[in-house]
Amino acid sequence: MDQQLQIPVKIVVDNFTGTLTRTNKLFDSLTDEELQGEVSPGRNTGIYLLGHLVAAHDHLVTLLGLGDMQYAHFHEAFFKNPDKSGIEFPPVAQLRSDWNTVNETLTAGIATLQPEEWLQRHTAVSEEDFAKEPNRNKLNVLMTRTIHLASHLGQLLFLKKNA
C-alpha cells in the first residue's frame, strides 16, 4: 500500500464520517414535528430532506460498488419531484429507520475499500470516459457527496427550535 495515498483517503473518509455523525446527531435531536417544518419559508421541509438524503446515500452505495439500491422507490418522491409536489412521503419513523439502515450499509462498505480502490472508477462512468477523466473516481464521488450532506446539514440546523 502506498503511504502517500493512505493519508488523503483517510482525510476524505474521515470528513464524510464526521459530517455523517453530525447529521445523525441533528436528526436524533429533531422531533417529528420539527422535521415537518420548512428550513426557511417556502423551502424544503426536514422530512423531505431526510428522504432525499436516504435516496442520495442509497445511490452512493451503488456508485461506490458496495451493493444494490434498497430505496430506489424514493427516487420519484425525493429526486424527481420537489417537496410540495403532493406526493405522499413515508412516515417519519420509517424514514429515520431507512436513514440508519442505509448508512450502516454505506459505512460498513466504505470500511472495506482499500486506498487504491478509491482511485478506481465509480459505477456511473464508463471505462472509456474514465480513461479520459480518471478524476471520475470513487474518492471524488465521496468528496462531492460529503459536500452535499454538509449543505443539507446546514439547512436542517434551521429546524432546531433551541438552536
Image: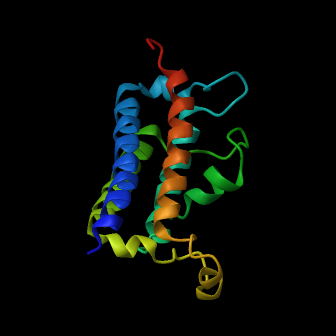
On the rendered image, what quadrant is the C terminus found in?
Answer: top left
Q: Is residue 96 above or below residue 141?
A: above
Which residue is rendered at x = 40% and y = 30% of the image? 26
Q: Which residue occupies the foreground of this view, 140 or 48?
A: 140
Q: Quadrant of residue 21?
A: top left
Q: Quadrant of residue 25?
A: top left
Tell me where residue 45 appears, x and y as whole percent: 60, 32
| Residue farthest along the top direction in this orientation | 162
Q: Is residue 30 above or below residue 21?
A: above
Specify whether residue 71 is in view. no
Which residue is rendered at x = 65% and y = 58% of the image? 76
Left or right of 86 in this view: 23: left
The total number of labels drawn is: 0
Which residue is rendered at x = 54% and y = 64% of the image? 72
On the rendered image, what quadrant is the N terminus found in?
Answer: bottom left
Tell me where residue 160 appears, x and y as whole percent: 47, 19
Q: Is residue 114 above or below residue 24?
A: below
| Residue farthest along the front direction in this orientation | 4
How is the rendered protein coloured? rainbow
Tell me where residue 80 appears, x and y as whole percent: 70, 56
Specify whether residue 99 is in view. yes
Tell me where residue 103 appears, x and y as whole percent: 36, 53
Which residue is rendered at x = 47% and y = 58% of the image? 142
Q: Which residue occupies the foreground of this view, 48 or 151?
A: 151
